[in-house]
Image (cartoon, rainbow, N blue to C red):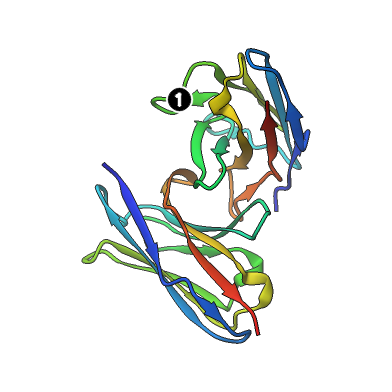
Amino acid sequence: EAQLVESGGDLVHPGGSLRLSCAASGFTVSNYMSWVRQAPGKGLEWVSIINSAGGTYYANFVKGRFTISRDNSKNTLYLQMNSLRVEDTAVYYCVRGRGYIFDYWGHGTPVTVSS
Amino acid sequence: DIVMTQSPESLAVSLGERATINCKSSQSVLSRADNKNYLAWHQQKLGQPPKLLISWASTRESGVPDRFSGSGSGTDFTLTISSVQAEDVAIYYCQQHYSAPLTFGGGTKVEI
């Protein structure tokens, strides 16, 4: 059975950095994987995707600040977040993809950016 | 970027009634290459992560009750719950899986 467990969310000051991790079981992260976020009381917002070839794409609002990566040997997905802003405050979900279809979601890890 | 617009923002229905949620994309998500509509619907219950209900506009995921159905093509899509049950209280989001940046509608809250 598929399982995704996110970790690494924390309270950080504006301008700070965090690395989120997502440990997968029951399937491999070597295919399409994404990060999607949800600000408090708001809707869903796609952040980044890595495809089966290792190609990466980012939402415009995180380009140059966030980096998605994975370690296939650990079956783990990562999101390195730098230059964090107050508006990056959200629950960050790790999501398995069938291509660009988000077919299985983790429970999320909360990130709070505040001074 | 493809902008997804949902309506209504919220919907109150009685148990057993039909619920209809609309989703409009700013450009067509119908692929000429494979004649498929690249549109998904997700359900998010309170305090839970989203769950994929439907992809390709009308293909239900395994285990999703058949009271949920998706329809539409091109830029206009609909999610219908034929007979709303108490466990269907949730926020429903459409999502285009046609091209990056991947985008969601703003969500429709279904209440009893």
Looking at the image, residue A79 sits to the left or right of residue B105; the answer is left
**Position in image of residue A47 (x %, y %):** 56, 62
- Asked whether B54 or A7 is in front, the reply is A7
| Chain label for disc 1 | B
Q: Which of the two residues, B39 or B8, is positioned nearer the viewer here?
A: B8
Q: Quadrant of the C terminus of chain B?
A: top right
Q: Residue at x 64, y 21 (%)?
A: B80
> Taking the image as drawn, is residue A55 in sight?
yes
- Left or right: where B21 falls relative to B89: right
Q: Position of residue B45 (x, y in %)?
A: 55, 39
Q: Can residue B35 be seen in the rendering of this structure? A: no
Residue B67 appears at what percent x and percent y? Answer: 54, 16
Q: Determine whether B72 is above or below B31 in the image.
A: above
Q: Is residue B94 above or below residue A75?
A: above
SS class of the residue under badge 1? Answer: loop
Which residue in the rendered view is the most extreme toward the left?
A: A73
B111 above or below B81? Answer: below
The answer to which quarter of the image holds residue B36 is: top right
Residue appearing at x 61%, y 42% in the figure: B96
How many badges with numbers are in the image? 1
Residue A55 vs A19, above or below: the answer is: above
Which residue has dot 1 on it? B64
Mark 1, other Cα within 10 Å: few <14 / some 14–19 / many ≥20? few
A82 vs A63, nearest the viewer: A82
Q: Position of residue B32 (x, y in %)?
A: 60, 32
Q: Quadrant of residue B111?
A: top right
Q: Is residue B22 left or right of residue A27?
A: right
Q: Amino acid at mark 1?
A: Val
Residue A5 location, quadrant:
bottom left
Residue at the spot 23% in from the left edge and 66% down from the top edge: A74
